[in-house]
């Protein structure tokens, strides 16, 4: 249940949220020191101020863009609320405001879904865990390695807790978060990373576990190795904080390096949902229209199956149609995030386009696998960012990359036939 590319669900954070809410940072020794000290040398007022309402709207919107992943909305709210209560200030910076020679980086977490066996759990619980906020520690470690201070935080992906963690890291450091991320949604693997797809290295990259283990990857034989190496550490530690893609402002502003204005999109979707609820309009239709999306299905949860497979949440969701979809079924497959949706056996949407399942009572996106049998949901689809439709993007984000015998066809073309 922590952030980017991580996929834990439920209500127990691995020591992370309580520490984050208490606004402390990890010092060089791996312990905790007052977060205020970290901000003194770089506190600034760059970017626009984010109010509590803006942050709440963005979190709700990110539950739509998270595609069933990106962490718990409940925990994301708790994290941001704790920061606000502690007096943290959140600011948002447009990429265009970066200087060419400034550096930014992306902090996120990797975590394993299923509870470990009793023997492994007992072993992990017996080891001291001095690092309460691994993501923050990784960000600081990468700064130390590069002997620089990052000008802003790149949001790792747009999913509730993923986004909240990036925002929280930025606020504690006294720097803005960029109005941009590396995906435009939530995704299963580090390999689905815009900086990589644009041809820029993700290294050096830093990783820190709750146990104080520190790793700096100075180079990789192949970019996919970052996923393999950090994922393995997450499995044996249950969680690892990561900071990667320490790119310059010049690269950040280049075409396709980042998905621009993604926080603003999430905020606008959440705002549309809130205003629709206030006016008596349909909030799910408002969310669809805000991002030119598609109604794929509406129905009740018949079953949902999942397992922890090599550190990923792998499963499917079977729905029985209601309303205009009465008599039909939809099957949605996911690996952390929804990847393929079939209506009565026909594929209607696949990654990298967005597939999201929304609760029709709360009007919030549902995090996998937090379903209940009989629950009524709506399924929406959105176009992905154009960078994922380029050959380099499809190499790491098409259905066949995940083992499906399905070609990628843009969602608007599938639904027009």
Image (cartoon, rainbow, N blue to C red):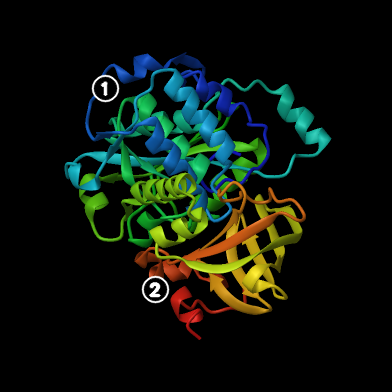
Give whichever of 395, 260 is nearer the camera: 260
Name the spot of residue 383 as percent of width and height, x first. Answer: 43, 67
Name the spot of residue 159 as percent of width and height, x first. Answer: 49, 47
Image quarter for residue 235?
Answer: top right
Q: Residue, x 51% and y 56% (percent of image)?
A: 284
Which residue, as the protein is rendered here, is positioned at the far right?
Answer: 118
For disc 2, the marked residue is 391
Query: In the rendered picture of this protein, how many numbered marks are placed on residues?
Result: 2
Looking at the image, residue 320 sits to the left or right of residue 100; the answer is right
Name the spot of residue 406 as percent of width and height, x first. Answer: 58, 78
48, above or below 404, in the image: above
Q: Distance between the residues labelled 2 and 1?
A: 41 Å
Q: How crowded is mark 2: few (under 14 residues within 10 Å), some or many (20 or more)?
A: few
Q: Residue, x 49% and y 44% (percent of image)?
A: 60
For disc 1, the marked residue is 43
Give whichever of 329, 396 is nearer the camera: 329
345, above or below 398, in the image: below
Looking at the image, residue 118 sits to the left or right of residue 306; the answer is right
């Amino acid at each position: 249940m922590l952030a980017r590319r991580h996929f834990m669900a439920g209500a127990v954070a691995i020591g992370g949220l309580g520490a984050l809410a208490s606004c402390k940072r990890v010092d060089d020794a791996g312990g905790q020191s007052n977060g205020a000290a970290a901000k003194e040398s770089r506190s600034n007022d760059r970017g626009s101020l984010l109010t509590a309402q803006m942050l709440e709207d963005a979190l709700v919107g990110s539950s739509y863009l998270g595609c069933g992943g990106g962490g718990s909305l409940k925990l994301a709210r708790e994290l941001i609320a704790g920061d606000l209560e502690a007096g943290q200030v959140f600011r948002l910076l447009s990429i265009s405001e970066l200087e060419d020679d400034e550096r930014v980086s992306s902090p996120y977490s990797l975590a394993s879904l299923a509870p470990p066996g009793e023997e492994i759990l007992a072993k992990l619980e017996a080891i001291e865990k001095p690092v309460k906020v691994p993501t923050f520690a990784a960000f600081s470690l990468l700064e130390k390695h590069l002997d620089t201070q990052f000008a802003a935080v790149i949001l790792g992906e747009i999913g509730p807790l993923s986004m909240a963690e990036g925002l929280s890291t930025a606020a504690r450091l006294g720097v803005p978060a960029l109005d941009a991320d590396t995906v435009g949604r939530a995704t299963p693997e580090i390999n689905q990373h815009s900086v990589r797809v644009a041809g820029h290295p993700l290294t050096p990259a830093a990783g820190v576990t709750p146990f104080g283990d520190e790793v700096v990857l100075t180079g990789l034989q192949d970019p996919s190795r970052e996923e393999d190496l950090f994922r393995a550490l997450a499995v044996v530690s249950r969680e690892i904080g990561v900071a990667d893609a320490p790119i310059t402002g010049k690269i950040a502003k280049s075409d396709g390096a980042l998905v621009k204005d993604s926080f603003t999109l999430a905020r606008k979707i959440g705002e549309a949902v809130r205003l629709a609820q206030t006016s008596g309009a349909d909030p799910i239709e408002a969310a669809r229209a805000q991002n030119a999306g598609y109604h794929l299905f509406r129905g009740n949860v018949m079953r949902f199956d999942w397992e922890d497979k090599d550190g990923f949440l792998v499963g499917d969701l079977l729905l029985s149609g209601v309303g205009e979809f009465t008599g039909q079924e939809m099957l949605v497959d996911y690996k952390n995030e929804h990847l393929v949706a079939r209506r009565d056996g026909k594929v209607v949407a696949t990654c990298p386009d967005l597939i999201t399942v929304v609760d029709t009572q709360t009007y919030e996106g549902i995090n996998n696998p937090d379903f209940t049998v009989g629950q009524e949901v709506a399924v929406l689809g959105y176009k992905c960012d154009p960078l994922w439709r380029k050959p380099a993007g499809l190499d790491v984000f098409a259905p066949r990359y995940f083992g499906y015998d399905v070609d990628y066809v843009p969602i608007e073309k599938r639904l027009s036939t």
